[in-house]
Image (cartoon, helix red, strand yellow):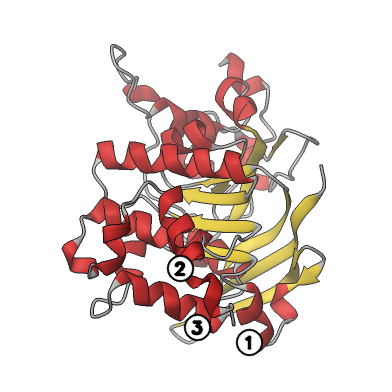
Amino acid sequence: MAAILNVRNISAGYYWEGGFTRILENLNFDVEKGIILGIAGESGSGKSTLASVLYGSLKYPGKIISGSVMFDGVDILKLKQLELRRIRGARYSFIPQAAMNALNPVKRIKFQFYDLFMAHNLDKSEYDKRMLDAIELVRLNENVLYSYPHELSGGMRQRVVISMALALSPELVLLDEPTTGLDVLVEHDILSDIKRIQRSLGITMIFISHDLSILFQISDEMMMMYGGEIVEYGSYKDLLYETAHPYTYLLKNSIPVIGKNIDRNLLIKGTPMNFSNKNPGCYFLERCIFADDECKLKHPELQGSNHMYRCSRYPMWKDM
């Protein structure tokens, strides 16, 4: 299937304390049309920086050093702000972290939809139909449109934000930790809605989360990030059943399973990598229980085709 997004040679970082720290390291991947790509990693792995790059919204002190993000054949990193605004919200939507706080607290929901439609020069005759269709998608009642954000529950506000992201029928939606702060039952319902909507409309989605269990539920393909680079990429079945990188394996082992005790010898110890002090070998070296001397000296390349991994010890580590 054709790709809707092609990411090539992306490197990016931040200026701080008188210097520049590189976060993303030469990222290359494609997102096929009509799938959900899950991107996973701990806090500090580079996920949110990647989200900003993919949406063309990385601002100073952030800086893109190299690369391109081709959306349907157009490099969004080279577009002027006016050209970007025409694409954002209409063809390519973004649901950020703490999306519930993205709503204007002093405007009723209806008029926040109107603001969105006006910004994209939608014909006024379409306003109400688009708005009603959007809230129906996320199973909200029409009464919500006459409410202020503070009058709605957290789950309802999140559904409103999702409906606004879908109101102009985008081809691609980027979701950065969209269920953060919600209780487990509400989170489950919203994840079910997201998957149902994606399947029924054929939208492409990129879903970023630190929670591997969520991504195994919702993704078609998955990408694991550590130290600002891709360490494993493949179908969700590849990562779930044929895990190739120790980071994926150890994170997967930390997911609670009813009736099964977690093996504490297989938990990730230590703290995420210090980007300003990268070692010459594998970035996961200091936290990996399968590392050997080779891992200290040589930085592993990404291997494989459909199922890719960055580990010189695979498949040997699986026999340890």
On screen, residue 70 above or below 40:
below
Cα distance between the residues tagged 1 and 3? 18 Å
> Of callouts 1 and 3, which one flags the residue occurring earlier in the amino acid sequence?
3
Cα distance between the residues tagged 3 and 2? 40 Å
Q: Amino acid at mark 3?
A: Pro
Identity of the residue drawn at 65% across and 66% down: 91
Can the viewer see residue 152?
Answer: yes
Identity of the residue drawn at 59% across and 69% down: 55
Q: Amino acid at mark 1?
A: Gln
On screen, residue 75 above or below 59:
above
Q: Which residue is mark 1?
A: 81
Foreground label between 3 and 2: 2
> Of callouts 1 and 2, which one flags the residue occurring earlier in the amino acid sequence?
1
Say the numbered circle drawn on residue 128: 2
Can the viewer see residue 43?
Answer: no
Q: Which residue is mark 3?
A: 61
- Identify the image quadrant of residue 142: bottom left
> Of callouts 3 and 2, which one flags the residue occurring earlier in the amino acid sequence?
3
On screen, residue 8 above or below 243:
below
Q: Position of residue 179 (x, y in %)?
A: 36, 50
Cα distance between the residues tagged 1 and 2? 28 Å
Q: Residues within 10 Å of mark 1 (few under 14, many from 20)?
A: few
